[in-house]
Structure formats: C-alpha cells, structure tokens
C-alpha cells in the first residue's frame, strides 16, 4: 500500500450540500421549539431516570426507546411497536426523551423541543447525556450568554 492516509470523506462538500444540511431536503427537518405549553406535566423528579439501555416496558425492545418525562416509563418508538405513542394516547403524557439521540419530543405540540434552551428540560437532558456517554454534554454557545470553562482542578501551588 502506497497511500499513507486513507481519505475519510469520499465526496467534497458543496454549497448545495451545506444548504441541504441546514434546511433539510425532503426529510421534514424543522427547528426544535424553544418553548412548550406542556411542561407542567413534567415529572417532579427528573434527577433519577432510567438508563438509556432500559428495554421497553411492554415488549422488551432493547434499544432506542423513549423515556416519558411525565412518569418515567420507558417505551419503544413508532418504528418498533409504537408503545410510546400508545402511552401518550392513554395518558396524555406528551413529553418524551429519545434515548437514541436525546432529543425531546412533545406529542401535543407535534414538535421537537430544544432541551438545552428550555430550562425545565435542561437537567434531564444533562442527566440522560451523562448516563449515555459517561461525560457531560459539550458546552453550546448561546447568543448573549457567556460560557466560561470553569475547570478549577486541584491547583496545589505552594504559595
Ligand atoms: Zn414496546
Ligand atoms: Zn408517562
Ligand atoms: Zn408541548
């Protein structure tokens, strides 16, 4: 083999690709909402949540389930046995968190919610992220908010 490096990207990114990434093609991508009228139904204890590898409560489907943020039940997606949608229809619990990508969906709004912007969702998103990746989520710059990397480690400097 003469090549020293293997190219990871086979196709050069074009402006058109970037536009597709930003706005989606026909995938129906929409901006997550930064507000939601249904946050009152959130569980009062979202510090203790099931781990992301929890199987569906009904059919034991092992991965990529959803967590109900109202009662913390773990149920499978519409691509499996639709148990979370059934749960919503039975209980009117509209807020769910995806264990596959940690996005938050509101069935009543029929929209994704920005869990890093909506304050009542921030902690559960953080907790789920740590459970899934064993590290805190990367800091995201928000307009008007100054984020300082506050890494006060053990500075044992002899004064
Ligand atoms: Zn299921
Ligand atoms: Zn529920
Ligand atoms: Zn909503």
Image (tube, rainbow, N blue to C red):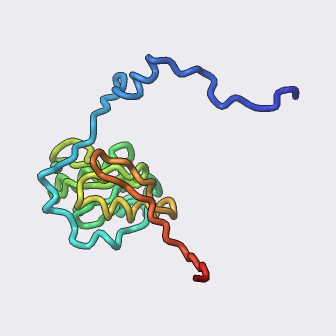
Q: Is residue 78 visible?
A: yes
Residue 116: give x, y in percent of width and height. Answer: 31, 53
In this rendering, the count of numbered labels is 0
Give the camera-side residue of 92 and 155: 155
Question: Is residue 15 shown left or right of residue 94?
Answer: right
Asked if residue 43 lies left or right of residue 48, the reply is left
Residue at 82 percent across and 31 percent down: it is 4
Q: Which residue lies furthest to the right in this view?
A: 1
> Which residue is painted at 29% across and 66% down in the image?
72
- Give whichever of 69, 123 is nearer the camera: 123
Residue 104 locus on image (x, y percent): 30, 51
Residue 60 appears anywhere in the view = no
Q: Where is residue 147 in the image (x, y as percent from the top left)?
A: 37, 55
Return the residue found at the far front: 159
Q: Looking at the image, which is closer to me, 137 or 38?
A: 137
Q: Position of residue 130 (x, y in %)?
A: 45, 63
Residue at the image point whose x is 43% and y is 66% from the top: 51
Residue placed farthest to the bottom in the image? 159
Quarter of the image for the N terminus: give it.
top right
Image quadrant in which you'd find residue 121: bottom left
Quadrant in the picture for the C terminus: bottom right
Vertical placement of residue 65 versus 153, above or below: above
Q: Which residue is pictured at 27% across the width and 37% down the height?
A: 31
**Does residue 63 lie above or below 43 as drawn?**
above
Q: In this view, does 17 lie to the left or right of 4?
A: left
């Amino acid at each position: 083999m003469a090549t020293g490096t293997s190219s990871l990207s086979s196709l050069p990114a074009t402006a058109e690709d970037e536009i597709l990434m930003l706005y989606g093609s026909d995938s129906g991508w929409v901006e997550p909402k930064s507000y939601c009228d249904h946050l009152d139904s959130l569980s009062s204890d979202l510090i203790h949540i099931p781990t992301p590898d929890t199987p569906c409560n009904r059919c034991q489907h092992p991965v990529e389930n959803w967590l109900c943020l109202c009662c913390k039940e773990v149920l499978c997606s519409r691509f499996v046995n639709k148990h979370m949608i059934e749960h919503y229809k039975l209980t009117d619990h509209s807020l769910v968190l995806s264990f596959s990508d940690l996005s938050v969906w509101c069935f009543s709004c029929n929209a994704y919610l920005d869990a890093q912007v909506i304050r009542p969702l921030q902690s559960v998103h953080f907790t789920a992220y740590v459970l899934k990746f064993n590290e805190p989520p990367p800091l995201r710059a928000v307009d008007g908010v100054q984020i300082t990397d506050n890494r006060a480690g053990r500075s044992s400097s002899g004064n």
